[in-house]
Image (spheres, rainbow, N blue to C red):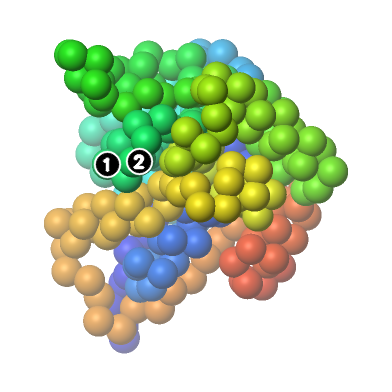
Amino acid sequence: MSPPGYTVGVYDSGVGGLSVLRALLVAIPEAHFVYVADQAYAPYGERGAAAVTERAHRITAGLRRDYPLDALVVACNTATAQAIDHLRQTHHDLPIVGVEPALKPAAALTATGHIGVLATRGTVESARFHQLQQRLQKGDGSGPHFHSQACDGLAQAIERDDTALIQTLCERYVHAVQATVPSPQQIDTWVLGCTHYLFAADILRPLCGGQAHLIETGTPVARRTREVLLALRPSPAHAHASLTLLSTADPTMLARLAHRWLGVPEQAQLWQA
């Protein structure tokens, strides 16, 4: 009998975390992933910190009740910013990996020193986000300049797969950031500070400038998760990858978009934490 593989929970407010899941499936093919889309309460980006934290605790407890988790990936920038410290205090025996806007990689990559950041309001206004920016600033003012924009409604439009609204909102928010500098070309690097936004990259890329860098967090999160799992125990030699998709609302959209974006069977289940 093959040794048991890893079991990894992956949690987001909706379908955006599928961008992280895609990277995880490549990096850790021997794992069983349980993906939860908390669509009954999406989007998180415009909810208060207390509500986001309560949902994070409920989802984590529910996953641990139903599955033998080896690790949890909080594949949501807003939930990471507002709730991950609380989760780690409560579930101190469970490795928890979060996602944060990729400000540090952007700072290392930019040639102009001007970086656009597209994120949810919950992320942009969080203390964790401001602390991350401050750590990258230099005392003489020569550090990178972050031009941050709260993109109200964009994650929800991606949840609904509303192409026309996604286009409209992307144009609005990219132009708002570009208006903060004398020339749009000054912003040569863009941080996609919500896991949903990678799925709008084809729309965002020409708006941001064809040569601009778009940075997301899926690959480094997957790399970190693999390191965490290997620290627990060696990788099973013959374990097979598997995936369970769960939604706290009608799972039809989750199943359809997971099939489109990840190429997995169009199957998802209704689940209650």
Q: Is residue 169 above or below residue 265?
A: above
Label for residue 108? 1
Label for residue 85? none
Q: Secondary structure at mark 2?
A: loop
Query: The N terminus is located in which quarter?
Result: bottom left
Q: What's the residue at 62%, 71% (across, down)?
A: 264
Q: Relative to residue 17, is residue 73 drawn left or right?
A: left
Q: Relative to residue 59, is residue 1 drawn left or right?
A: left
Q: Secondary structure at mark 1?
A: helix
Q: Relative to residue 244, is residue 90 drawn left or right?
A: left
Mark 2 residue type = Thr
Q: What's the residue at 66%, 29% (across, down)?
A: 175
User: Residues under labels 1 and 2: Cα distance?
Assistant: 6 Å
**Position of residue 252 measured from the top left corner of the image (x, y, whole percent):** 78, 54
**Position of residue 42 measured from the top left corner of the image (x, y, whole percent):** 66, 32
Callout 1: 10 Å neighbours few (<14), some, many (20+)?
A: few
Q: What's the residue at 48%, 23% (across, down)?
A: 147
> Which residue occupies the extreme front position in the image?
182
**Residue 252 appears in the figure:** yes
Q: How many marks?
A: 2
**Residue 132 appears in the figure:** no
**Position of residue 161 measured from the top left corner of the image (x, y, whole percent):** 78, 48
Cβ atoms under marks 1 and 2 closer than 8 Å: yes
> Which residue occupies the extreme right position in the image?
164
Residue indicated by mark 2 = 110
Q: Nearer the viewer, residue 210 or 85?
A: 210
